Amino acid sequence: MSRSVRDVVLVDAVRTPFGRAGEKGIYAQTRADDLVVGAFHELLRRNPNLPTDRIDDVAVAATTQIGDQGLTLGRSAGILAGLPRTVPGQSVDRMCAGAMTAVTNLSAGIGFGAYDIAIAGGVEHMGRHPMGEGVDPNPRFVAERMVDPEALIMGKTAENLHDRFPHLTRARADEYALLSQSKTAKAYRDGVIQQDLAPIAVRSASQGWGLATVDEPPRPDTTLDGLSTLKTPFRAHGRVTAGNSAGLNDGATAAIVASEEIAREFDLAIKARLVSFAFAGVDPEVMGIGPVPSTIKALDKAGLSIKDIGLFEVNEAFAVQVLAFLDHFGIADDDPRVNPFGGAIAVGHPLASSGIRLMANLAKSFQLQPNVRYGLTTMCIGLGMGGTVIWENPNFSKAA
Amino acid sequence: MTSTNSLGLTAAPDEVVTAAHVRTCQVPAGTIALITLDNGLDYNKPNTFGVGGLTALSRALDEIDDLIRRGNIVGVAITGKPFVFAVGADLTGVPRLENVEQAHALAQLGHGVFRRLGEFTVPSFAFINGAALGGGLEVALHCTYRTISSAAYPVALPEVSLGLVPGWGGAYLLPRLIGAPDALSFIVQNPLRQNRMTSARAATDMGIADIRFDGGNFLVDSLRWASHVITGEITVNRRDVDTGDEWTTAIAAARGQLDAVMHGAAPAAYRAIDLIDAARNRTRDEGFAAEDDELAALIMSEEFRSGLYSFDLVQRRAKRPVGVPDKSLARGVSKIGIVGAGLMASQLALLFAQKTEVPIVLTDLDQERVDKGLAYVNGEIDALLGKGKLSNDKANRLRALVSGSVDLSTFADADVVIEAVFEDLAVKKQVFANVEAVVSDTCLLLTNTSSLSVTQMADSLAHPERVVGFHFFNPVAVMPLVEIARAAHTDDASLATAFALGRSLGKSCVLVNDRPGFVVNRLLTRFLGEVTAAFDEGTPFEIVEHALDPLGLPMPPFLLVQLVGPAIALHTSETLHAAFPDRFAVSANQQAIVGARINTLLAWDGPVSRLTDEVVSLITVGDDPSTAEHVRQRALDAVADEARIMLDEGVVAEPQDLDLCMLLGAGWPFHLGGITPYLDRSGTSERVNGKRFLPRGIASLPA
């Protein structure tokens, strides 16, 4: 048989509003799988042309695949969302890059011809599943000094990154954090972020049913003064604070990917076209540097240079990790091409869900900026990895 | 906490109060105030409205009035806790209502609170997310619009089945919403058809709900829909209600149907029809006031108090039978043998296979009978498959479970063997002896006898302690009762196993002692014996057949005998006559009919029945006719007498068990309370026995 690689497009991407993890959070009494199902429902509602019986796979990511994040989420959430029984599903895990990996795995399958249409998703309910729940690290990691024990505590890896790049100071990190908050606040004022939020029914035994329609984590009143007084929980006199890192959050995301040919056949939206993707490993102790090698790899595969990239969606697990990335590529801390609607420091980072949030934002920017041809989404990943996906703007026109 | 409201009603101290939480939701149209009804317990304990719950909802509505006054709200919505909207009035407090003023106050309190949902300056929405019954559904009916979850079940206004009317707005609002024909079927006819419940789909088709959404995203979809309705993006189209001829015709038809069944026996259904009839011309205030009056009167009626008692027996006592050994003693059942392959045995095989899903073996004397039995079972499975009640895989599974043999040794590894052979003690003793020779020492032996002595049947066995009476009612798939009879030697483990099996069959089981005819057949036969005697003495058929109509029994006496089969009825009365010759007679006419092998007693001229000419030619009657009233009194006196004797003999523990058996085994109506509440309130108990069966207030109005 003859075979050719097919173009893969992002048809749509949505997410639930993100919540603060914990007893007072909006999702304190809402199940993780119900967040996924809520995102799926919104995705299906927004795309009435989608032939659900033509969905060839559903991949949903979660870092902690236990309880309501277990039971092969791609399959169970598909059934719960009312997808046809004929649609299969799977679970994916690459920690913070779970949803990103769900998208790239499915896209690879589409490119190969195994799938025509697929749904990717990610969820993390960090309130119901605190980081590290149920982990059982192999004792060889420590006994054979394979990995520093600090590498399992993300905040400590961020402090390690400050050590490696002494010029990336706490002050720069705080300034970056403030910028993320203010860009998010502006995006909310402009009504940009709300457009891709799936309203979620939430219930609390003491308050009854409610509706989550906006992100809970943003702190639009953040000031530099305020940030400068925050404690550094990971190291005495350290640099990493709750203000210059993403919080602990609950939320889910979902996206449709399809072969471009099929998307056109069914008149589905084309919001971004996949160019290349790459994952790379780094020392687990400085996992935040991961996006640098993964981006180099992805650019290389695409035959592009960093100068070709007009928009960057960089996950903000920690400000220092974004700064290390920008610093490496010679991009200013406040470059307007980077995270134009703010990032995880403001809206939150429910681990495995975040990859698709980056893609939703990039797709929105592609729509608003037809002059830009290429953009990328990238994120650092626990245990020392980075992931990068490069996308082409389908709205691109030289005239614009 | 005790709260007293302005009408002077006090919340019962043990009321599980359904809270009404208010939370605001942002939708594109603006802010909707959403009320959640939640009693704080899981779905097994659904939301109900007592005085405390109504007061809580009233406070929530105050809060919303305040929000509306401040101009912050574009709509109001109300929904339930997961899987439950609300299932109506909290009935536990009702027996405490002592006078019509209190009953009236409760009716008014409900209206006063619920009607506010329909009288805001902004539209209101009920999001029916789960079970919605009675007052729960009435809450929704007061709202301007309704959405319903596909998963919501059941949906119904069952008040009439208990002896009430939907008197918190339902009888006025529903017919005006969906028209009289459907409202009559929903409010009057469904409750009288074994309390038929409605699905979300049917409720939507009928126009009770404006739109149905899937359960998975129900609240989100409902809020979005409400937003569109508020902004005018969606217009809700309702059916045109014909308040003219269609209404009039439907009311007349409903009254006629009711008369044919109830003969005026209980008031609730009649009052419901009256309210529905008048709803078309009444204002809201008039309609609600009329409901208050009818509801108050019915709450203070004996029929309703008996209905409430019956409901409690069927809902609670039937599920927790009295005097039964602990279920932990029950032995496991992984194979069941059935002796006999006749119709009863085949029906049992099908029921056992469907409900227990363990292998079932039918045996009979020859292969031909076995094959006939199996053919019946497979035919029924095919029929279920054809109707879509079974999947192909499930049908295959059931077919594979039921096998037949002429060799009793196939029972060797059975845990239960039930005999369904001819009603003859010697035959049954022989069957059990043969079975005992092949089965284990602990294999439970059940007999489906309706009148023979279980103790005698077990007497000569090596292990008589494993023999239990297990008396089904015909048709076995439908009738909910099994009388489980403890014989002299029966041990606790065997009895516990029999009850566990009965429960797994989905039956309500009542423990009875091994006395002839157990409960239902003994009371029915005594009752019919008196009616038959009146006929034999020369009371005309038309008088006898309709003498009991004012009780509202499921069918008249001759029709019942025809349905049961004259031979079986005769056999039962002969057995009971042998045991209690003074009280149970054998009718010569009945013997003549059975002797002529006649099964059909009645011929029909339209709706009017008469004895067939063949029957008339066989019988001889006397010249001492009774009046209808006299026939009725004799029959009731006989039942009161027999019931008292049965309690004295210890056939069952309490009158409640007699009533439960009559409700479930004979289909006697809720408004009679089975039978002893009616015997008490009609003065029969006092006259016959010198005392009541139940103290006042248990199944009747308080003293």
Image (spheres, coloured by chain):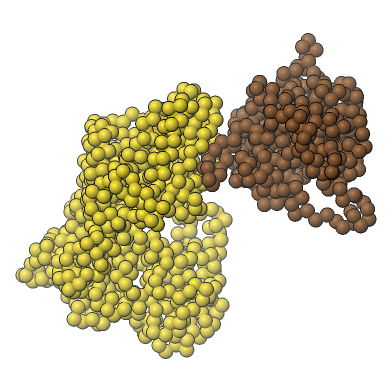
Q: Position of residue A271 (x, y in %)?
A: 72, 25
Q: Residue reaching furthest top? A: A399
In the image, residue B543 above or below residue A193: below
Residue at far left of view: B623
**Position of residue B196 measured from the top left corner of the image (x, y, whole percent):** 37, 50
Measured along the vertical axis of the image, is residue B610 above or below residue A226?
below
Q: Is residue B553 visible?
A: no
Badge count: 0
Q: Nearer the viewer, residue B535 or A257?
A: A257
Q: Residue at x 84, y 25 (%)?
A: A333
Left/right of residue B496 with respect to residue B182 in the rendered view: right
Res. B383 in view: yes
Q: Quadrant of the C terminus of chain B?
A: bottom left
Q: Viewed as shown, does residue B443 lie left or right of B514?
A: right
The quadrant in which residue A318 appears is top right
- In yellow, which chain? B
Q: Residue at x 82, y 21 (%)?
A: A335
Q: Is residue B308 above or below residue A207?
A: below
Where in the figure is residue B56, as x and y percent of width and height? 41, 44
Residue B171: x and y, percent?
29, 41
Between residue A388 and residue B197, name the one nearer to us.
Answer: A388
Residue at image coords 12%, 62%: B628
Of residues B700 and B406, the one nearer the viewer is B700
Tell me the shade of chain A.
Answer: brown
Residue B615 in the figure: left or right of residue A4: left
Query: In percent of the image, x 35 and y 67: which residue is there?
Result: B473
Q: Nearer the viewer, residue B379 or B391?
A: B391
